[in-house]
C-alpha cells in the first residue's frame, strides 16, 4: 500500500558506501518540506491478528526543537505532555493507513492526515546503538591511521616508540617501525602520531611526531621526522630525515599531532604551549600553535606562500593558527576539509574547536585569555568573553564549537579530540563528530546544522575506560585507543 502521492514523495539516495536511505517529503503550498524516514512493514510484524495488510511506517526524527507542524488539518490526541514534542533522544513511529487517512503513534497518539500535514525544520536522525569491538591489545597505543588508499591495513602508534601494522582482515599485527631507542618517554612525551604522505603508495614516505632527549631546556625536543617504507609492512629506521624540531621547556603540553590536509597536501603539526601560557599568543613562538609545512619543497621544508602570517614582521611563517594550550589531537573532515581539534583545558573547561577550510587559517582560539567560553583571568569559571578584562575584542577570537565545564560535567579533565564520521559501516553516523574525555571516560558525538550544534549524544561503552585517542582507517571507520587496547566503533 502506497502513501498518497498528493502529499508524499519518496526519494532514494545511493551513497558512495552503496547504502540506500529513504526519506519522505511532507509538504504543502508555502511550507518548508519536512523530511521523514519511511519503511514498509507487513502488519504481521506488528500484530498477528490482521494478516496480509501492508502499512507504511513513518519515523518522526527528534531534535533540539522537537517536531513542529505548521499547517492546519493536524489533530492529535495527547498521550502525555505536548504531543508535538517527541521525548528527547526518542523516535516516534507512526503506522500510516493511506485508505482512511489515520496515523497511530506507538505511544498512543493519533494524527489525522486525511488532507495535508506540512512541517518545517530538519530533525536529526536518531543515533542507533553502537558497540566498541576490541581489534587488538597494544602497549600504550596513542594513534591509529592509514594511507588513504589502503583498506587492508591500519597503523597503530605505541607511545614507547613502535609502530605496528594491523591487518584489518584478521586483526593480526606486526612491527612496522621501531625507533624506541631514540624516543624520550616522560610526562606527556613519546612517539605520539603518524601521517602518511598523500602519495605513500608510490613514494613510501611517512612522517612521525616524537620527543627525543636534549634541547636547550634539558627537557627534550619535539621532533617531526620523515621515514621511508620499502613496502607497506616494513619501514627502514635508518631512513630518518629531520623535518622540524622544537625545544620543549617542560615535558607537558607537547601537542603531538601530525596530519596532511586533505585538500592542500601540506603537513600540519600541533605544538602545545609547554606550560608557558603567554607563549600561545606570541607569533614569534611555535608554542601553542598549529604549524603548516610544505614537505615536498625546500630543505627540509618550505613555508606555504598562503600561510596567514608569512608577511607579518617578526612572526613565524610556519604558523597556521594559535592561541592553544595543548592541542593533543586534531583531525580533518575528509569531506569538507575543516580542521577539528580538542584543546585540553586548565581548570575550568575543555573545548572542541573548528577551523573552516574556507577561512585560510589565522584563527586565534583565545588561550590564555579564554578557556573555552570562560575568561581565564577571572578565575571563577563563570565570566564569559564580554566581561573578560584581558580581551579587547571578542570578535577577533574563534570560540569553541562545544565546551564542557568541569563543574557541569564532574570528573572531566582532558578532552580527546576525535573525528567526523565519514565511513560506510554506520551510515546513520555520517557527519557526526566524536570526542571524549580521558578522566571521565565519556564519549560524545554531535552534528552541525549550519553552525548550530544539534543532536548531542553521550555514548555508553563499557569496554572503554580512559580513552586516550581516536583513529580513522582508510574507509573512514573510527577507532578508540585506551592504555592497552584498540577498539573499533561498530553498529550495535
Image (tube, rainbow, N blue to C red):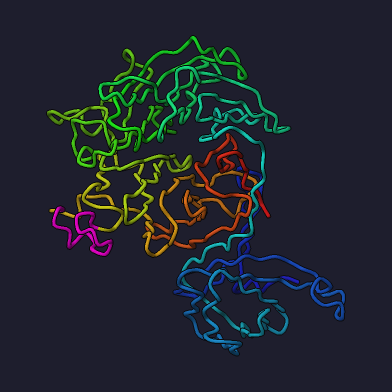
Q: Which quadrant of the view contains residue 144?
A: top right
Q: Is residue 124 above or below residue 485?
A: below
Q: Residue at x 46, y 69 (%)?
A: 64
Is residue 345 highlighted in magenta? no
Q: Quadrant of the C terminus?
A: bottom right
* Percent x, y of residue 235: 56, 15
Image: magenta residue range = 375-391
* Percent x, y of residue 433: 48, 50
Q: Is residue 251 left or right of residue 474?
A: left
Q: Is residue 235 left or right of residue 361?
A: right
Is residue 376 highlighted in magenta? yes
Viewer-side residue, 431 vs 212:
212
* Percent x, y of residue 248: 30, 28
Viewer-side residue, 479 vs 121:
479
Q: Residue at x 48, y 55 (%)?
A: 440
Q: Is residue 339 above or below residue 299?
A: below
* Percent x, y of residue 50: 85, 80
Viewer-side residue, 5 vs 437:
437
Amino acid at each position: 500500500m502506497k502513501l498518497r502521492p498528493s502529499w508524499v514523495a519518496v526519494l532514494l539516495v545511493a551513497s558512495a558506501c552503496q547504502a540506500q536511505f529513504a526519506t519522505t517529503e511532507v509538504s504543502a503550498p508555502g511550507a518548508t518540506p519536512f523530511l521523514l524516514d519511511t519503511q514498509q512493514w507487513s502488519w504481521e510484524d506488528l500484530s498477528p491478528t490482521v494478516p496480509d495488510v501492508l502499512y507504511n511506517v513513518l519515523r518522526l526524527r527528534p531534535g533540539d526543537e522537537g517536531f513542529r507542524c505548521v499547517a492546519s488539518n493536524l489533530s492529535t490526541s495527547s498521550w502525555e505532555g505536548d504531543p508535538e514534542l517527541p521525548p528527547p533522544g526518542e523516535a516516534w513511529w507512526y503506522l500510516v493507513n493511506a485508505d482512511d487517512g489515520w496515523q497511530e503513534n506507538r505511544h498512543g497518539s493519533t494524527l489525522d492526515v486525511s488532507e495535508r500535514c506540512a512541517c518545517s525544520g530538519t530533525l536529526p536522525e536518531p543515533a542507533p546503538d553502537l558497540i566498541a569491538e576490541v581489534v587488538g591489545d597494544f602497549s600504550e597505543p596513542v594513534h591509529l591511521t592509514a594511507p588513504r588508499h589502503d583498506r587492508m591495513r591500519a597503523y597503530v602508534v605505541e607511545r614507547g616508540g613502535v609502530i605496528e601494522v594491523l591487518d584489518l582482515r584478521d586483526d593480526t599485527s606486526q612491527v612496522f617501525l621501531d625507533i624506541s631507542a631514540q624516543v624520550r618517554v616522560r610526562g606527556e612525551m613519546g612517539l605520539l602520531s603518524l601521517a602518511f604522505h598523500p602519495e605513500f603508495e608510490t613514494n613510501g614516505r611517512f612522517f612521525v611526531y616524537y620527543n627525543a632527549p636534549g634541547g636547550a631546556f634539558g627537557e627534550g625536543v619535539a621532533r617531526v621526522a620523515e621515514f621511508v617504507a620499502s613496502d607497506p609492512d616494513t619501514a627502514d629506521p635508518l631512513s630518518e630525515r629531520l623535518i622540524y624540531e622544537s625545544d620543549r621547556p617542560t615535558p607537558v603540553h607537547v601537542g603531538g599531532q601530525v596530519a596532511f590536509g586533505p585538500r592542500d597536501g601540506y603537513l600540519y603539526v600541533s605544538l602545545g604551549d609547554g606550560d608557558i601560557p603567554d607563549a600561545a599568543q606570541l607569533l614569534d613562538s611555535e608554542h601553542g600553535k598549529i604549524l603548516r609545512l610544505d614537505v615536498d619543497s625546500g630543505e627540509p621544508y618550505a613555508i606555504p606562500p598562503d600561510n596567514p602570517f608569512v608577511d607579518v614582521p617578526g612572526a613565524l611563517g610556519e604558523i597556521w593558527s594559535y592561541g592553544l594550550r595543548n592541542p593533543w589531537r586534531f583531525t580533518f573532515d575528509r569531506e569538507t576539509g575543516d580542521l577539528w581539534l580538542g584543546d585540553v583545558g586548565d581548570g575550568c573547561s575543555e573545548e572542541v574547536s573548528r577551523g573552516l577550510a574556507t577561512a585560510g587559517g589565522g584563527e586565534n582560539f583565545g588561550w590564555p585569555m579564554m578557556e573555552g567560553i570562560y575568561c581565564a583571568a577571572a578565575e571563577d569559571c563563570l565570566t564569559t568573553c564580554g566581561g573578560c578584562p584581558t580581551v579587547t575584542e571578542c570578535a577577533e577570537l574563534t570560540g569553541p564549537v562545544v565546551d564542557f565545564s568541569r563543574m557541569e560535567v564532574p570528573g572531566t579533565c582532558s578532552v580527546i579530540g576525535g573525528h567526523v564520521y565519514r565511513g560506510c559501516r554506520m551510515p546513520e553516523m555520517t557527519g557526526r563528530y566524536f570526542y571524549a574525555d580521558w578522566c571521565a571516560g565519556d564519549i560524545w558525538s554531535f552534528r552541525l546544522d549550519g553552525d548550530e550544534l544539534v543532536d548531542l549524544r553521550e555514548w555508553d561503552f563499557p569496554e572503554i575506560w580512559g580513552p586516550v585517542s581516536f583513529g580513522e582507517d582508510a574507509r573512514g571507520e573510527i577507532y578508540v585507543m585506551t592504555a592497552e587496547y584498540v577498539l573499533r566503533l561498530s553498529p550495535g
